[in-house]
């Protein structure tokens, strides 16, 4: 997808601190961490947001949710973590390529919104 920041990160046109990669997804450290551990997991296929997930592309989301616990274990998030996906303007989505934030490494705020 032209002009998509995260598509550029996947192919290496924009550098990132990679923490995981396989055929279907890519994970890297968020450039502006909101917790001691803040990683983004993204599908390699360009999907706009969680609002664009349907029967044609949901298998990659299932795959990502198998990968998330592996990443969490590798990063030592034994006390737990949070998975967040912002959608659209009201959800304050700033990059329009589906991504799941993994946040952890400390007790997080109880408030979500
Ligand atoms: P959103 O606000 O769309 O849910 O999340 C986008 C996230 O991407 C933000 O947390 C932001 O810090 C992160 N981000 C934006 N640009 C870059 C970048 O160039 N590199 C990395 N590693 N993260 C980025
Ligand atoms: Zn993209």
Image (spheres, helix red, strand yellow):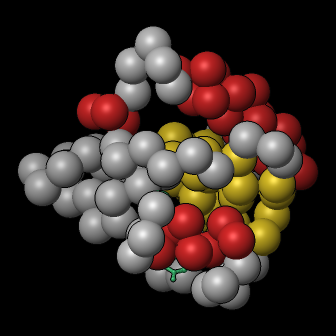
User: Is residue 26 in view from this perspective?
Assistant: yes
Q: Is residue 108 left or right of residue 78?
A: left
Q: Is residue 78 left or right of residue 93?
A: right
Q: Is residue 14 left or right of residue 97?
A: right
Asked where in the image residue 96 lies, by quadrant, the reply is bottom left
Q: Is residue 43 left or right of residue 56?
A: right
Residue displayed at 84% across by 39% down: 70
Asked where in the image residue 68 lies, by quadrant, the reply is top right
Q: Position of residue 42 (x, y in %)?
A: 58, 51
Residue displayed at 19% across by 50% down: 88
Residue displayed at 43% across by 44% down: 47
Give the residue at the far front of this rendering: 2
Q: Position of residue 23 (x, y in %)?
A: 81, 44
User: Is residue 33 in view from this perspective?
Assistant: no
Residue 79 versus residue 23: which sits nearer the camera? 23
Q: Is residue 64 above or below residue 4?
A: above
Q: Quadrant of ligand 1?
A: bottom left
Asked where in the image residue 55 lies, by quadrant, the reply is top left
Residue 106 versus residue 102: which sits nearer the camera? 102
Q: Is residue 110 above or below residue 15?
A: above
Q: Position of residue 27 (x, y in %)?
A: 70, 58
Residue displayed at 28% across by 67% down: 94
Residue 52 versus residue 82: which sits nearer the camera? 52
Q: Is residue 29 above or below residue 72?
A: below
């Amino acid at each position: 997808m032209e002009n998509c920041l995260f598509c550029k990160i996947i192919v290496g046109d924009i550098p990132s601190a990679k923490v995981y990669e396989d055929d279907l997804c890519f994970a890297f450290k968020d450039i502006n961490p909101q917790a001691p551990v803040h990683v983004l997991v993204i599908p390699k296929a360009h999907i706009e947001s969680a609002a664009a997930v349907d029967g044609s592309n949901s298998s990659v989301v299932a795959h990502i949710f198998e990968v998330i616990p592996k990443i969490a274990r590798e990063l030592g998030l034994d006390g737990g973590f949070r998975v967040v996906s912002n959608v659209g303007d009201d959800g304050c989505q700033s990059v329009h390529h589906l991504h799941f934030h993994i946040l952890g490494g400390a007790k997080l705020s109880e408030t979500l919104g």
